[in-house]
Image (cartoon, grey):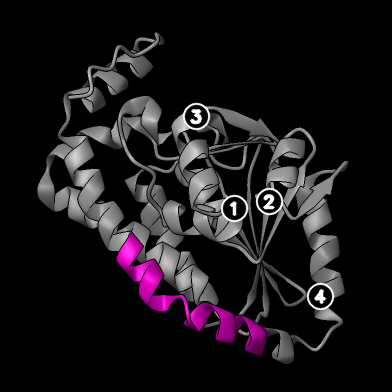
Amino acid sequence: MKKVQLIRESGVSIIQLNRPETYNALDIEALEQLEAIIKEVKNNEDKIVIITGEGKAFCAGGDVSMMATLKDVDLFDDLMNAITNIVTTLYFMPKIVISAVNGSAAGLGMSLALNADYVVANKEAKFGMLFGGIGLIPDGGAHFFLQQRVGTEKAKQFIWSLEQMNAEEAKQAGYVDVLSEEDAFVAAKILASKLSQGPIQAFLQTKEILHTQNKQQLEEILLLEKEGQLKASQSKDHREGVRAFLEKRKPQFQGK
């Protein structure tokens, strides 16, 4: 079974994260599959994309089991380059992108969810930028997407809180665009149907104009995230954070 699946229905490409047993955590293989599928979707004829997760969560973020690879510079480069390619290809894709969030969107999972033109969330969904819990910094363009949506100060404070917001709080804060009582994927398909009846080419011209002006900023932030993540991954706090996570205890950070 593939860890990421592509389904095409009536002019909509559906990208489904498919590791429900890990709450769709992204390991290296899943990231590589996601990168390949996003490139495939970029070149197909569909004008709308829905990204969702199988099972009880949208995406729990990066798989902690792959954190050991951060110690290998070459593997670290491969990992971060894959993330960069995913982010930039998705952000500049000439299609309307909708993320459908059921359950948790945490860490890299939240970064992925925010890299959409619409974030649709079920009322029971939760959002958290929880990288700091294992001594890392947000990546996947998180600094860019958070700043775009809520501004610099609120972005910093949310990252530093190490807490999750419920869907209503996320809607009020500006991270969620559509809050749904029903399954987020169902709500996303309804939104996709509505958008498909509009002047899609005109919509996409607007997206191109607004996104193109952000190209340099996004690329600079992705590079800074890569450099910052390498530094953070070599810290004592990161090692302590991973140990604490695996041992299911609260980390004792020392700021080192």
- Disc 3 target residue: 161
Identity of the residue drawn at 19% across and 45% down: 230
Identify whether 25 is placed above or below 256: below
Identity of the residue drawn at 72% across and 37% down: 169
Number of marks in picture: 4
Query: Which is more N-terminal, label 2 or label 3?
Result: 3
**Mark 4–mark 1 distance (CA, rounded to whole Å):** 25 Å
Q: Which mark is residue 195?
A: 4
- Disc 1 target residue: 150
The secondary structure type at the circle numbered 2 is: loop
Percent across and percent down for residue 174 are 68, 51
Percent across and percent down for residue 121 are 74, 46
Residue type at tag 3: Ser
The magenta stretch spans residue 52: no
Residue type at tag 2: Gly
Q: Which residues are magenta?
A: 204-221
Identity of the residue drawn at 78% across and 41% down: 122
Query: Which is more N-terminal, label 3 or label 1?
Result: 1
Residue type at tag 1: Val
The magenta stretch spans residue 217: yes
Mostly what secondary structure, the magenta segment?
A: helix
Q: Quadrant of residue 20?
A: top right
Residue type at tag 4: Leu
Pointer 2: residues within 10 angstroms few (<14), some, or many (20+)? some
Pointer 3: residues within 10 angstroms few (<14), some, or many (20+)? few
